[in-house]
Image: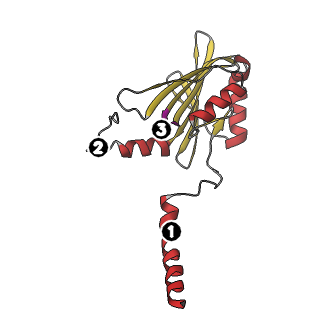
């Protein structure tokens, strides 16, 4: 009886590293989450819709891609008071998980500095970079990215915050590797 038990124990010890790589524990806390105003890349569409309702914002409206039915493009209007100006939410989701989220709009005069303060207090100070008339701050954490971008347009501050989950996009990209069909319609 001792030999089968030892064999089972040894086999389970050998499988633990393999299982850890295949399926990370769903209950483990996500310490790499980058979020802004309660939105986070990697969120499920149901979570985003619920968050919008809690903000008294517009309804999340989604359309599936005709090329790859796993992909949805979603939009919603954002509450001006919450965002600090007229705003929009755009989400690109794969299998109902947000790969890219963008919040954008024309901001009230002091709102850009408020957004910057929120982000720097959560994620640390980073140097602003510019390209032409556009400026950017960017934070990256374990395959995720958050970017604040802004520019002046006709005297108004136009800004956006983009949240990207590289793991979601990489998973989709691997499933569309050469030799595999991107069109998943049946």
Is label 2 in contact with label 1 (beta carbons under 8 Å)?
Answer: no
Q: Could you tell which of marks 2 and 3 lies nearer the N-terminus?
A: 3
Q: Dot 3, how many residues are within 10 Å of its Cα: few (below 14), some (14-19), or many (20+)?
A: some
| Relative height, residue 9 to residue 180 (above, below) | below
Residue identifier under label 1: 17
Q: Residue at x 62, y 29 (%)?
A: 49
Residue 112 location in percent, x, y?
68, 24
Q: Main secondary structure of the magenta part?
A: strand
**SS class, disc 2:** loop
Residue 89 location in percent, x, y?
58, 24
Nearest the eye: 104 or 74: 74
User: Which disc number belongs to residue 125?
Assistant: none
User: Which disc number belongs to residue 180?
Assistant: 2
| Relative height, residue 17 to residue 108 (above, below) | below
Q: Dot 2, how many residues are within 10 Å of its Cα: few (below 14), some (14-19), or many (20+)?
A: few
Which residue range is magenta in the image?
A: 93-98
**Position of the C terminus by quadrant:** top left
Q: Residue furthest front?
A: 1
Q: What is the distance, in whole Å, between disc 2 and disc 1 at their CAs?
A: 29 Å
Question: Is residue 155 visible in this depiction of the protein?
Answer: yes
Q: Residue furthest top?
A: 154
């Amino acid at each position: 009886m001792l030999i089968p038990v030892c064999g089972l124990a040894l086999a389970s010890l050998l499988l633990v590293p393999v299982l850890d790589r295949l399926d990370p524990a769903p209950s483990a806390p996500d310490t790499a989450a980058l979020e802004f105003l309660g939105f986070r890349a990697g969120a499920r569409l149901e979570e985003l819709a619920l968050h919008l309702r809690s903000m008294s914002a517009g309804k999340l409206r989604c359309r599936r891609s005709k090329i790859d039915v796993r992909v949805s493009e979603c939009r919603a209007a954002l509450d001006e008071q919450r965002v600090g100006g007229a705003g929009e939410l755009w989400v690109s989701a794969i299998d109902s998980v947000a790969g890219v989220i963008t919040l954008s709009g024309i901001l009230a005069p002091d709102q850009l500095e408020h957004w910057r303060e929120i982000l720097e207090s959560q994620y640390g100070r980073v140097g602003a970079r510019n390209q032409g008339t556009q400026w950017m701050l960017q934070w990256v954490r374990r395959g995720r990215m958050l970017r604040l971008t802004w520019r002046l347009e006709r005297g108004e501050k136009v800004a956006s915050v983009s949240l990207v989950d590289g793991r979601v996009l990489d998973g989709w990209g691997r499933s569309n590797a050469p030799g595999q069909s991107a069109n998943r319609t049946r």
